[in-house]
Image (spheres, coloured by chain):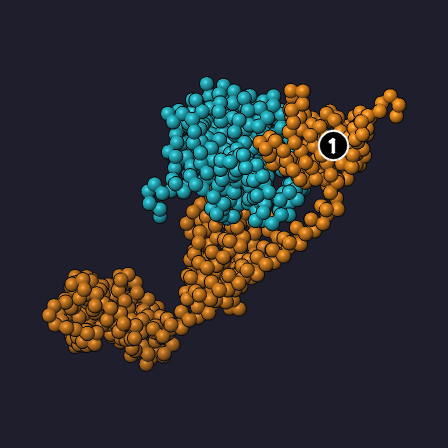
Amino acid sequence: MTGSELPAGRLSDESYEELYEHAPCGFLSVSLDGVVVRANETFLTWTGYARSDVVGAAFTSLLTPGSRLFYETRFVPVLRLDGEAREVSMELSRYDGTTLHVLTNSSLVTHDGTGMVRIAVFDSTERRTYERDLVTARRQAEESEARVRVLQDAASAFAQSNSVMAVAQALVDVSRVAFAATEVAVLLLKNAVALEVVAGVHPLLAHMPADTLESGSEALRLDDVFALSSVEEGEEFSPVVGAAMRLARIGAITSTPIESESGLFGVLTCSFGRGREFDSAYYGLSRALARQASQVIGRLLLQEQLASEALHDQLTGLANRALLQERMDESIAGALREKVPLAVLFVDLDGFKAVNDHLGHVVGDSALREVAGRLRESVRATDVVGRFGGDEFVIVCPESGEDAAMAVAERIRSSIARPLERVHSRFPVTASIGVALWEPGDDAVDADLLFRIADEAMYRCKNAGKDCITLVRV
Amino acid sequence: MALPGTQAVDVHRRNNVRISGNPGGRAIVFAHGFGCSQEVWRAVVPFFEARFRVVQFDHVGAGGSDTSAYDPGKYDSLHGYADDLLEILEAENLDDVVYVGHSVSAMIGVLASNRDASRFGALVLVGPSARYVNEGDYVGGFDQADIDGLLDSLDANYLGWSADMAPVMMGNPERPELGDDLTASFCTVDPAIARQFARVTFLSDNRRDLAEVTLPTLVLQCTDDVIAPLPVGHYVHTHVAGSEFVLLATTGHCPNLSGPSELANAIQAYLA
């Protein structure tokens, strides 16, 4: 130590050099252009590079691609704006191709008039592994918790729904959140073949042929979740679907069947703004949600069917007497309120008894069903057609004066007079029609009175030779 | 629906819209990329304030935006962000807009103007990429595994922290001298949103959208940009008909930080 004695606590240049090169952490100096200008021995030892590999190289070339993305998009802005970036996790790509997990502290300094970044590098392999396990475990726990929460939310939303529409809407709401879907729709079968959107939005439909849903039951040949992960997959599946995805800016779509033991009755579609891969967790959850909804929808549909059966004639599907009575009461109230006339038509089939007696009840029933169909086609959308009993039918025509009522009656008369499908021409069937026309005035009326007057008018037709119309003003 | 006028306020708040510069000047809108906030334009904006009406905003999830407006379904694709941009132009009643989009915001501008070009006058795409992941002959610069690596990196850097703590960690509350709220919210991002935004940004494929661009377009490319390397910038340039291409001398992916004056000059030269 002769000649270079230093005051206590001061280090020689060599000692500083030694401390820098062999410090228990790596040191790097990087230019503002991102080029490494200096690196210490510790860094070289940890990464396995020769000094000449590192100095002069871009710092990003020492990073794994994932880390490079983070560095450029996050680290650089923070460092530039804040002057420093602490405890930033990075992955270095070692000379031998392996990865070294490090934590870095960096600061922006001005040295000899030029900006420079100093980076201290700490090996964090152990900590990183531990943290990663922690994050993975936590994410798994969160995912399974989220799944349970979605199913619970769905169950409680469905339980509060008292109509099929409400369940469908709840399924849309829950699915949209659960899958981060851009749009969700629930489609149900309207009749045996056509699908109908009952809740939410199906963005592709606006860009597909108008009759797409008419043969929608085709789509229900699904026996599991159907997925298109990209527009390209959509094009491969069908050019129409691919084009619709492009126009609707939808990159992926799934359809999940909504089914019960008795078969499929609808579909849940989730549309996404960009392509995505669907994993088993997605499939599982969408199946579970659709199953939950289908149970509730199935029960509600059954209830609706039972309620409908209680008000409809089983043979013809027309309103039964109870429903006719209800509609009559409403129509009378409406006529009084709006001060508009109301017509009630009583239709009795001529010659039907002979059909029943000679051709049997099976043919008779089919004739009644055919007549019911013709009645439906002859009336206006606002009219109500009901079966009063046997071969007697009643039509309630709100807001109808004499002209309108007679027009409906005439359409019915001529329609019934056409030959029936399974009935031989030796047994002609025609209609005697009595019309009761009421204009709200001083006299009170009720449903029974109007039925009775229409019935009496019908009997006048019978006496006048049948296949005709008699109108009576109340 | 909201009353007339209230929508403008909501958009303003949702996207933390900030307006400065010359109120009578042409509107120039700056949109930040993934990873930061409108703060990245800090050194660029002063070059424009004398002549332009300068509009900056934060994407929902970044900076001073209203994170309660974050709807994972809406923001699962860049279209959700494009919707917001169109709403901002509408709410501020801007016309003939010069739109400057950095990184992913370049494609957000492309999508928005393809949908409704009526309020746009020109596009300036800074470090754009129509697709980050390689596919067939297309060179995007990254593989799917690299994007997974970025998500890992995000986890390592802030998802390990509790969600409540993370925004504080990423901001700089330890520097109270930067007192005003703009600076205090500098570069903050919501970690959960950042994770989804990373996926949306780096897994999007907007190659087909380039052909639909009809606006005068300037493509600005940095030297040695590992996020959007030269072939990626060239791809955008060749697929946007009539676009102009300028290679900046500044390096890296953030010319707004590394070479603000060079960037500003290039934009002004294009608009002149």
> Which residue reaches farthest front?
A7
Q: Disc 1 marks which amino acid?
A: Phe
Residue B121, quarter of the rendered image: top left
Of A237 and B25, nearer the camera is B25
Chain B as rendered: colour: cyan
Which residue carries the number 1 mark? Answer: A27
Q: For the point 53% across and 68% down, which residue is it?
A: A261
Position of A449 relative to A74 (above/below) = below
Seen at 32% across and 70% down, the residue is A318
Q: Identify the subunit bearing mark 1.
A: A
Chain with colour orange in the figure? A
Give left or right: position of A304 versus B227: left
A299 or A381: nearer the eye?
A: A299
Please name the residue shown 56% across and 33% down the image.
Answer: B103
What percent of the width, then of the height, locates residue B260?
A: 55, 24
Q: Nearer the viewer, residue A309 or B199?
A: B199
The extreme left residue here reads A442
Classify residue A448 by image quadrant: bottom left
